[in-house]
Image (cartoon, rainbow, N blue to C red):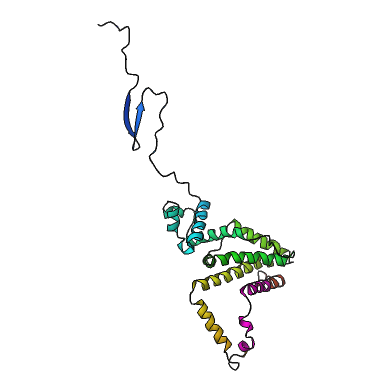
Amino acid sequence: MAPWPTTMPSYPTTRIRTGRCRGERVRYDRGMSAKREPVSRRERPAKPALSRQGIVDTAVRIMRAEGLEKLTMRRLAQELDTGPASLYVYVANTAELHAAVLDALLGEVDLAGEGAGKGWRDRLLAVLTSYTTVLFEHPQLARSTVVARPSGENYLNLVERLLELLSLSGATREQAAWGVDKLIQHATATAAEHATQEDDPTARDDWNALTRVLDTVEATTHPAIKAHMPALLSGTPTARLTWGFDVLLNGITSTPVPGPAE
């Protein structure tokens, strides 16, 4: 048997081998005291996690830049670099998406009623006018509210403020509760009608045709119409909107809400 060597044979201090790790070639160095971090070859940064707020914020940007008609689930998914199916976890359908976008825009409503008088009616009219103005600025979105009313934080803040001001009118809780729905409905319907006319190239021609008919109506066949011209067509859109709110407020504060048996 050979004697045990008194000295150990020398070996290279560094041995290098290569291998593959998840599709990337990695270099190993036995003599290194710490492992070298592999460097990813992915050029794009990691995508941020999806969230409802992120989806809505992106939807608002698309609507402002391209219009509501371009705001589809497919277009939104493309912008977020994901598949349309992933969005349905956060938004049920296009109608709900439009409602969420509208709620985001309702953050622009002046709930304080700046510039109005100190009375409850003046401040209430100012808030309602501000709400209607937001809808007028986005006519296509206003039309979508007919089928999908928002229910987010900004919409709740609007309803809260309207109820606060209505309570100062002396209206009962029931009158205020029913009345706030009619006030919002009047503003929304007015904006939706405006949106329809904006999108219809023949709307102006139709209005002119109606004006000509009413101007030439015969008193023998339509005496009431003849007697109320030209008042039937008078007034600016703003004046008519405000008058409509006043009519509703007068009715809300003076008309009792029917009981359960009525």
Foreground residue among 22 and 29: 29
Please give left or right for residue 50 compared with residue 150 in the image: left
Which quarter of the rendered picture does the N terminus lie within? top left
| Magenta residues (range) | 224-248
- Classified by dominant secondary structure, the portion drawn in magenta counts as helix
Single out the residue that lies furthest toward the bottom.
Answer: 220
Count of marks overlaid on the render: 0
Q: In this view, does 47 lie above or below 25?
A: below
Q: Where is residue 193 in the image (x, y as percent from the top left)?
A: 55, 72
Task: Give me the residue at 42% from left, 58% from top.
Answer: 74
Query: Does residue 186 appear in the picture of this structure?
Result: yes
Query: Does residue 173 appear in the picture of this structure?
Result: no
Please give left or right for residue 85 compared with residue 98 in the image: left
Task: Give me the residue at 64% from left, 68% from top.
Answer: 183
Q: Where is residue 259 in the image (x, y as percent from the top left)?
A: 67, 70
Q: Which of the 4 image quarters holds residue 231? A: bottom right
Foreground residue among 138 and 158: 138
Which quarter of the rendered picture does the C terminus lie within? bottom right
Q: Which of the 4 image quarters holds residue 255? A: bottom right
Does 236 appear in magenta?
yes
Foreground residue among 72 and 151: 72
Does 5 appear in magenta?
no
Q: In this view, does 51 lie above or below 98?
A: above
Q: Position of residue 234 (x, y in %)?
A: 63, 80
Q: Position of residue 126 (x, y in %)?
A: 67, 65
Q: In this view, does 262 lie above or below 167?
A: below
